[in-house]
Image (cartoon, grey):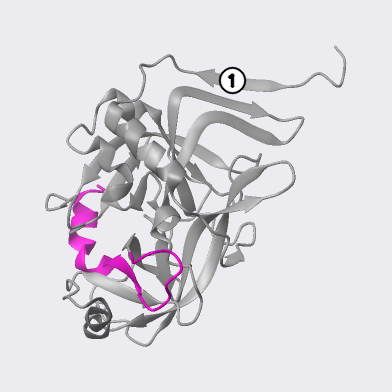
């Protein structure tokens, strides 16, 4: 056999077309503005910060010779590994499956871990199917209240360490502390367009200051992170579900913000300390 033969690994699952709502959500994502603002994350620095993909036809191809990963899916959100088989994300990220957590659409979800560049071959990357989605019981799709969900992975991830959450009894306030947000931004070259993991510094501000900026009350179970003078790092189109990390622990899940380029408005995160009991119950 010739040494230059391309090695293919093909996993193809015949499945029905995605639901109309799923297709609309993904089409809306295609139209969203994206930016490359922030610093590209170093490979291996955040192996537990992952991406959620939706595969239209279940087609997944590795093309090892070119070092590329080809598929019919698209990235829809960020997520984080919090134990060996659960990831934490925003409920908005998978809201097109709300009320149908075990539908055929669920079989088209994949979680891609331990990579800093999507649609490229990454040695050591872990890709898992999703078995279940648990939405917060009080999640509201319109107001984004309780915008949190847990995905149960099919793969038991033992080669990566989970991202630490706040310790029991930790005070819910992080006002004045510096943190890091991570999001997937679009990088373009002469030949390709792909998402890369970006990191950027933020400062945690009080909910009262945050409320004054928006002109309405920010819920107590939300956390506000300001980018100061840096534009665009809270872009909700590609940051949803991504973490804000303070002192090595995830303290928030990106939920929403105002626009992509207006640094006068902080990013709004679900405050992890407000949901610790819920997370524990739904990751057993």
Residue position for label 1: 10
- Closer to the camera in the image, 196 or 23: 23
For the residue labelled by badge 1, is the local secondary structure a helix, a strand or a loop?
A: strand
Where on the picture, by quarter, is residue 178? bottom left
- The image shows residue 217 at horizontal and vertical percentages of 16, 76
In the image, taking residue 1 as reference, residue 260 lies left or right, namely left
User: Residue 268 magenta-drawn?
Assistant: yes
- Neighbourhood count class around disc 1 (C-alpha, 10 Å): few under 14, some 14–19, many 20 upward: few
- Residue extent of the magenta highlight: 257-284
Asked whether, in this view, residue 120 is left or right of residue 11, the answer is: right
Q: Name the spot of residue 15 as percent of width and height, x first.
A: 38, 16
> What residue is drawn where x is 28% and y is 49%?
92
View extreme (top): residue: 1
Q: Is residue 95 magenta?
A: no
Q: How many marks?
A: 1
**Residue found at the far bottom of this picture:** 176
Residue 90 is situated, as x and y percent measured from the top left of the image, at 31, 53
Q: Is residue 123 visible in this depiction of the protein?
A: no
- Is residue 96 at least partly visible in the picture? yes
> Which x, y percent locates residue 103?
25, 26
């Amino acid at each position: 056999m010739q040494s230059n033969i391309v090695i293919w690994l093909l996993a193809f699952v015949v499945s029905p077309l995605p639901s109309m709502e799923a297709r609309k959500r993904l089409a809306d994502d295609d139209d969203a503005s994206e930016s490359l603002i922030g610093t590209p994350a170093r490979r291996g620095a955040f192996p537990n910060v992952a991406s959620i993909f939706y595969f239209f036809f279940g087609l997944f191809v590795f093309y090892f010779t070119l070092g590329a990963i080809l598929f019919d899916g698209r990235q829809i959100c960020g997520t984080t590994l919090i134990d060996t088989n659960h990831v934490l994300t925003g409920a908005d990220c998978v809201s097109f499956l709300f009320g149908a957590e075990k539908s055929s659409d669920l079989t088209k979800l994949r979680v891609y871990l331990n990579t800093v560049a999507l649609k490229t071959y990454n040695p050591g990357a872990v890709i898992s199917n999703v078995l279940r989605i648990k939405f917060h019981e009080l999640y509201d799709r319109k107001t984004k209240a309780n915008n949190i969900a847990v995905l149960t992975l099919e793969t038991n991830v033992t080669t990566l360490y989970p991202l630490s959450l706040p310790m029991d009894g930790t005070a819910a306030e992080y006002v004045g502390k510096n943190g890091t947000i991570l999001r997937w931004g679009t990088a373009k070259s002469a030949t390709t367009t792909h998402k890369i993991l970006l990191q950027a510094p933020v400062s945690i501000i009080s909910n009262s200051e945050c409320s004054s900026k928006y002109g309405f009350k920010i819920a107590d179970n939300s956390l506000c992170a300001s980018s100061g003078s840096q534009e665009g790092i809270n872009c909700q189109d590609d940051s949803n579900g991504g973490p804000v990390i303070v002192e090595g622990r995830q303290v928030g899940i990106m939920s929403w913000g105002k626009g992509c380029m207006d640094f006068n408005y902080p990013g709004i995160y679900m405050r992890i300390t407000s949901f610790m009991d819920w997370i524990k119950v739904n990751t057993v």
